[in-house]
Image: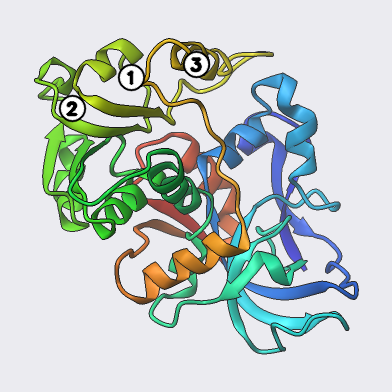
Amino acid sequence: MKGVIQTGFGDPGEVLRVGEVATPAVDDDGVLVRVRAASIHIGAVYSVRGFPKVMRPLFKSLNAKSGVIGQNMAGVVEAVGTNVTRFAVGDEVFGSCKGAFAEYAVTTSEALAPKPTNLTFEQASALGVSAFTALQALRTHGKLREGRHVLVTGASGGVGTFAVQIAKAMGAEVTGVSSTRNLDMVRSIGADHVIDYTQQNFTKGEPEYDLILDNVGAHSLADMRRVLTADGLLLANGAPAPTGWFGGLGHPLKVMVSSLFSKQQGRPFLSMENEEDLSTLRELAETGKITPVIDQVFPLEDAVEAVTSVGKGHNQGTSVIAM
């Protein structure tokens, strides 16, 4: 089969290639999926670049044994292990695995869910890291309640497009921050208000937000907290692109220290993919409360270009590789 293979750490154009690898074997608890689409998240770009360097052992562990990269996909079940009862050959599924950027990938049944019937394979593959991050940030860490006013920075990006829609589904009033060209799109997915960051510095306004999900990290923590209500909460999910051995880790450290002294500062968090939230995202999609925003769809042979493009930023939603 063909897959996107990482040969080292560095620029995607230098360390990635599309090549032939063995189709992964299925053990008794495994599910082999014929991948139809796989989504690209910014974290995958950082993993390929290998920054911060201290994280490289972890980055290596995220790839398949063959070196194939990718984490989230959607496709059709090709084979199942003898212990698998939840899925059968021919089922349309989505979920997570190691080595998603390939024609076939193997995973466990717990990491999969039935594909939402109203989504394409490309859309379903996007219900991955970004969607989990948005859901868990707002619900678990932000304790979002109906009627609260939420500000989402980076509202046109992978996490941001999901955050706007999930916050609306939870009954919040939502303000999305993006560049000029993305304002209409952010408004179209449900934002009640939009702010063009090229024209307006929202941190200079009056305190009015009950929850801020900052996916960019362009303003100081103090400036962000200044526009929160007295019992508001800042969740800092964005940071400068990591470089060097420890670059990129300074921001979450600042957030952690700040959270010890300010009740408005939420602690750093990592989203965790799990079976329950996978079902929640499926339900939100099938009821029309969230629809993944797809920026570009690349064929597998152009996967290196696709990863490079995502690394440049400014995507509208999520880019996808179609097999």
Q: Residue at x 9, y 20 (%)?
A: 206
Mark 1 and mark 2 in contact? Answer it, CB < 8 Å: yes
Residue in the image at 49% along x and 73% along y? 121
User: Which amino acid type is shown beneath numbered disc 3?
Assistant: His
Density class for disc 2 (Cα within 10 Å; few <14, some 14-19, many ≥20) is: some
Crowd tier of the residue under label 1, counting other residues whose Cα lies within 10 Å: few below 14, some 14–19, many 20 or above:
few
Q: Which sits earlier in the primary sequence, circle 3 or circle 2? A: 2
What SS does tag 1 mark? loop
As measured in the structure, the alpha-carbon distance from the residue carrying label 3 to the one carrying label 2 is 21 Å
Q: Residue at x 42, y 52 (%)?
A: 318
Circle on res. 218 = 1
Q: Secondary structure at mark 2?
A: loop
Q: Which is more toward the observer, 278 or 13?
A: 278
Q: Residue at x 67, y 59 (%)?
A: 100
- Report if residue 46 is visible in the image: yes
Residue occupied by mark 3: 251
Please identify the quadrant where the N terminus is shown: bottom right
Disc ID at residue 197: 2
Asked if residue 44 is positioned above or below residue 266 in the image, the reply reads below
Q: Is residue 220 visible?
A: no
Question: Tags 1 and 3 in contact by the CB under 8 Å rule?
Answer: no
